[in-house]
Amino acid sequence: MAVISVSHLDKSYGKVHALRDVSFEVDEAEVFGVVGPDGAGKSTLFNILTTLLLPDSGDAAVLGLDVRTRYLEIRKHIGYLPGTFSLYPDLTVEENLVFFATMYQSSIKENMPLIASIWSQIEPFKKRFAGKLSGGMKQKLALCCALIHKPVLLFLDEPTTGVDPVSRKEFWEILRSIKQQGISVMVSTPYMDEATLCDRIALMQDGQIMRLDTPKNIIRDFNGHLVTLQTPDIFQLLKVMGQYAAHCTFYPYGENLHVIFYEPLEKAIPEFEVFLQQNDITHGEIEQIEPNIEDCFIEIVKGN
Amino acid sequence: MKELRQILKKEFTHIFRDRITLFLVLAIPIMLVLLFGFTISMDISHAKISVLDLSKDSQSKALVEKITSSGYFEVVSYPNAESEIDGDFKEKNVKLAIIIPPHFEEQLTGEKFVTIQIISDVSDMNVASILNNYVKLILNDFTSDYNAAEGSVNAIELTSQMMYNPEANSVYMFVPGIITLIMIIVTALMSSITLSREVETGTMRMLLIAPVKKVYVVIGKVIPYMILSFISTLIIIIISVVVFHMPINGSVWLLLLLCIVFMLTSASFGMAISAMVKTQLDAMMITMMGLFLPTALLSGFLFPIDNMPFFFQILANIFPGKWFIIAIKDVMLKGSGFLDIWLYMVILFGMAVVLMAFSMTRLDRRR
């Protein structure tokens, strides 16, 4: 049974069309990722599914319960971790956990086994004020608070935004272990590298789901041929590339330029080299590479 | 209930960890009571008075006519005996009573001074002293008119009797006002800030998603500030009684009940404000400009409501301070009982119920 099923969901705030005809399903014990830039509609989607917002049209069911009418039942069985730190900074780690456990009509004792592995990492700081924790620690505490009532479905809205890379990696390991305990996870992130850690991802842009599949399939179905090249002056190159936009999709990637050609490379690369020469661009070797999720996302959004 | 207890515990933890706010909340009332002490004069027209005319002769009628035509007074009652005057003060809300002695006309031409008695309600001291002066002016005018017409005449001697605040002590005036303002700061301001802080930091969202009853959330957050406010009020009352010898002529229990009702009203104003805003700063600005300031200006604490332009007299009715100040003065100074002030308590309680219902539905609303 699908833990979340959404069909033709629409939501506007005044003139802003935050969600347009969004449909998808999340299966049991799945880590479902919603990937997209800021303003794509991720938080709106989360707010509707966590019963804080009402959709304008379309249907959404969480755990088989309609979000419009049976929201009180839904709230008992879901956990939610918002993107911004939403605990009490002037309460200690322990006080926060006890408080939220009580709010969810649960107790720390009852569900300790579930959070034991995360709790063991923050327990040494349990007398510290939550506001004085590091970013990663704050999110671990927030996760404990979201899990303390043993939800069957966990919503994480950009849980790793503003968290250092090491803590991010740890956080995702924790998510995998949560999944192994049979809890379904719906997570949003603006970080493309994290998307590959999900079972399935929905790529969102302008309130629409552009693509929904496993990361593997999305990469497999990459449309076009991806090359990378290095140049001493990327700004000069980007300026010039404007004239070549009809032949390819291009974007800076770190210090390199990524270019997607839709024609066979045997034909496209020589033509491209001629173009670069004409514009006096010095560059390194033009290399074909395997696309990652970020390349796929940009291709889907920008390409044809 | 376990949830409510936990919320109360959490809120008290917030309060006790925020020492500065706690100190201010308890210290400001003491400072205000000790420092406050000014009065502002003003003009009055159409003050309600009652006239006890014991002579009913042509001169006494002429005097009453002169008082009425002055424009300062409106005679709402003509009691037949002195014993009825007290009732006029309590029921007809008269500010002043004039007693013209028997045989007024004879006395005017007689050898002794003529004595006219004035009884004024000095629970509003400014008003009382101004009205007293008006009467003196009119009487002077009356004698000089009479002199011009009849030749020599006895001067009229005026004896005034001040009721409810015989020493015209201004402490009696501002203590109810300070209690009102402190309760608004501590209950309305603090509860609007504490609730909007949860909205601002996102913790309100966490609480909304949790299956806890929303009534517990709001009540649990507001009760601690009501307790704090009650302590402040007690401090003010104790200081005014001990240091300034302010009387509590009515029942102390009624006074405390009245304070609790007003606290509920203030707290629900705070809740309603926080239900409309998203940040602590907005909550603070709106509470200060939209509730605190109008209460200070329109409640009759600084300026008498009777003297305001008609529009402001109407506007004053929607701020709870007006009703509370009337009621608390009645209880402390006039010694009124529950039956005299029940209407004010009902008005205050009604405001609380309406605003609380509004904020609860608004808080839990899904758009």
Image (cartoon, rainbow, N blue to C red):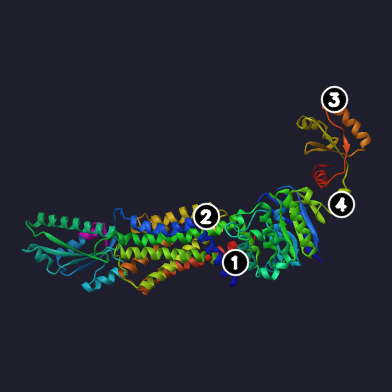
Whether pointer 3 and pointer 4 mark residues with C-beta atoms closer than 8 Å, the reply is no
Whether labels 2 and 3 belong to a single chain: the reply is no
Q: Chain of mark 4?
A: A
Q: Is residue B67 magenta?
A: yes
Going by the numbered disc 2, the residue's amino acid type is Ala
Whether pointer 2 and pointer 3 mark residues with C-beta atoms closer than 8 Å, the reply is no
Per the model, the C-alpha gap separating discs 3 and 1 is 69 Å
Circle 3 residue: A278
Question: Within 10 angstroms of label 1, few (less than 14), some, or many (20 or more) residues?
Answer: some
Q: Closer to us: mark 2 or mark 4? A: 4
Whether pointer 4 and pointer 1 mark residues with C-beta atoms closer than 8 Å, the reply is no
Per the model, the C-alpha gap separating discs 2 and 3 is 63 Å
Is tag 3's residue or tag 4's residue first in the polypeptide sequence?
Answer: 4
Q: Which mark is residue B214?
A: 1
The quadrant holding residue A287 is top right
The magenta segment: B66-75
Circle 4 residue: A216
The x, y position of residue B72, in whole percent, is: 26, 57
